[in-house]
Image (cartoon, rainbow, N blue to C red):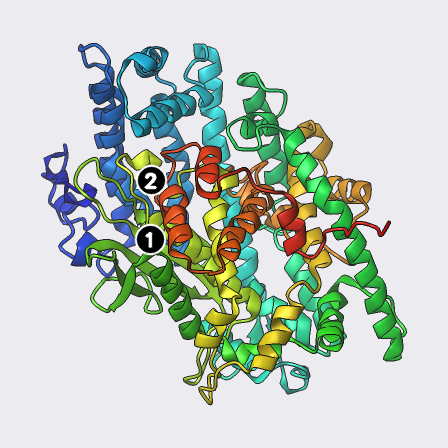
Amino acid sequence: MSETSVSPVASKGLENPLLKANPLLKAWQTPFETPPFDEIKPEHFMPAFEQAFFDHSAEIAAIVNDPAVPDFANTITALERSGKLLSRVASVFYDLVSAHSNPAILEIDKDVSSRMARHWNPIMMNAVLFGRIVALHDKRAELGLTTEQMRLLERTYTRFHRSGAGLDEAAKARMAEINERLAHLGTSFSHHLLGDEQEWFMELGEGDLDGLAESFVASAKASADERGMTGKAIITTSRSSMEPFLKSSTRRDLREKAYKAFIQRGNNGNANDNNETIVEILKLREETAKILGFPTFAAYRLEDSMAKTPEAVRGLLERVWKPARARALADRDALQELIAEEGGNFKLAAWDWRYYAEKLRQRRANFDDAAIKPYLTLDHMIAAQFDTATRLFGITFAERKDVPVWHPDVRVWEVKDAKGALKAIFYGDYFARPSKRSGAWMTSLRDQQKLDGDVAPLVLNICNFAKGTDGQPSLLSPDDARTLFHEFGHGLHGMLSNVIYPSLSGTSVFTDFVELPSQLYEHWQEQPQVLQTFAKHYQTGEPLPDDLLKRFIAARKFNQGFATVEFVSSALIDLEFHTQPASASADVAAFEKKELEKIGMPEEIALRHRPTQFGHIFSGDHYASGYYSYMWSEVMDADAFGAFEEAGNIFDPAVAKRLHDDIYSSGGSVDPESAYVAFRGRAPAPDALLRRRGLLEEPEAA
């Protein structure tokens, strides 16, 4: 029986007519049992959460109080079956918090984040429950478990152990307080950032459009429409708005104004300021690590990862940092020369870099983003990502108009496997709007599992692309198109999942492995045979000219020094925040300045995510001490795509089958190192990353 088929009406309290009418608590009579977003209102959430907390607590109590000797079925499997209603309610709620919030939803979120921690603390620290898990873990070799069951038992034991289940009562009580406070702080950080992003915009008058492409101006008008400013044009702090403006605008004064607003999000000394929030988060994380017996939060966090130690992470980042910084400094000098050539009497500043880098790229590679954007329409790139998945994995996509959605812009596809059976439902929410947090992400409303029937996942991709206006399509930059494929790679990880147990489904893997399926999928977006098929001019329908395609491919490694410095510096700051004593970062800005000086950060480049807007590590702890994961995974993805190149076919059936079986479908049921070796036949070669970014130092001639 699927999780959405479980009838919640047997739960205590549902005789109340108001609860019986709550769409979150009823069986969903919708296509594929999807959430009835058209019926759900903010006032439905708290009653639904209350019922879900009650049901889950009762299910856990039944496991804890079971008089039978602990076995896999009555303990581990029972845990896997528990909390279905809570998962259902929470997934819908957090989708709206991130993708289509409103003041009522955000107010509820403040309460729910603390309540969620208060609910989970006594479960994850329950001594009797942990005792049952330990008893099974101690004799695991004697239980006759399948490979997946053994993996689930080990992951369950690890999760409870790392949550403090083995601590004494005083330590558990303090851990519970910390967890609740951290949940509140992470929510506050996210709300502050969203608040700053909603409040700032810059209106563009007729004299402010020099250098801006027609398609960009159309998107700026669409952004104004979203804010009720019809007839005007604005830029916002959304990256899809800011990046092209900084690359194209000839108005240096406006570039400076926009850039400073972009990097100051969360750092404006107003009600949305995140500095104090960061300081408290770091103190509490440090205390958590000490309680659990680790010297630093990074040591605690990385023990349960592929990297294992802060030293291993630092080793990778420093290896990349040196050639990236050298390349960035050489590019900086070239940009300064370009300014001088044009008669500019000023020193290159951070708000100039993208603008002059584009000019330099036009000179060196005869290519700029504006030339290719008319060929990269969103609809064509969606078709490209679907076709790639069909050719690799045999799955097909059919758009559905009858599935309820949370916003009119959201699109839905039914995904079928090669035999025509339902595989997943895929939602795409692609456009920026004030109600959506910045960035791009994948999540799910329901995970794949086979424990109670063959449950098809409901997978979401959320992006923040600029919307076209006046009937014009949304045009993507190469970076936008790469982001689209990246998030769809995550989506495939969820859609292709083929496991029994929910806790091992899809993206339930180590953080430094989870980016492999997404970053690997990016490679197909930039392949000539994909672009030649799907990159067509939005006005004429003409395919991408061969000459422009060649120039695009030649220009891919341009400005990689900048991009790598921007990323690696952010990953190093994340690591330093969580390896140094929390007292060292009591002044966040001073800490940032000190660490950047220590690594020799070029002053013309800012962190990709400055601390007060670094939602990856402060809106929650999923990427805390783990932002390096993108680069750790890039070592694997650059090496993994080599398997297709070596086969001489980017859609080679044998390699694609291994990719499906060992990486995309196995979820967390296999150790990630073993999964990679099973696919590739060996461990990844680190030099593939440097080679892909054009940063590999060539050996000197003898």
Residue drawn at x 66%, y 53% is 691
Q: Position of residue 253 (x, y in %)?
A: 75, 73
Amino acid type assigned to the residue bearing label 2 in the image:
Ser
Q: Which structural element holds mark 1?
A: strand
Q: Position of residue 43 (x, y in %)?
A: 27, 50
Question: Which quadrant of the structure image shows residue 141?
Answer: top left
Q: Is residue 367 above or below residue 386?
A: below
Name the residue tied to disc 1: 459
Q: Is residue 273 above or below residue 452?
A: below
Q: Is residue 588 visible?
A: no
* Mark pair 2, 1: CA separation: 12 Å
Name the residue tied to disc 2: 505
Amino acid type assigned to the residue bearing label 1 in the image:
Val
Q: Position of residue 117 (x, y in %)?
A: 40, 31
Q: Which structural element holds mark 2?
A: loop
Residue drawn at x 36%, y 27% is 151
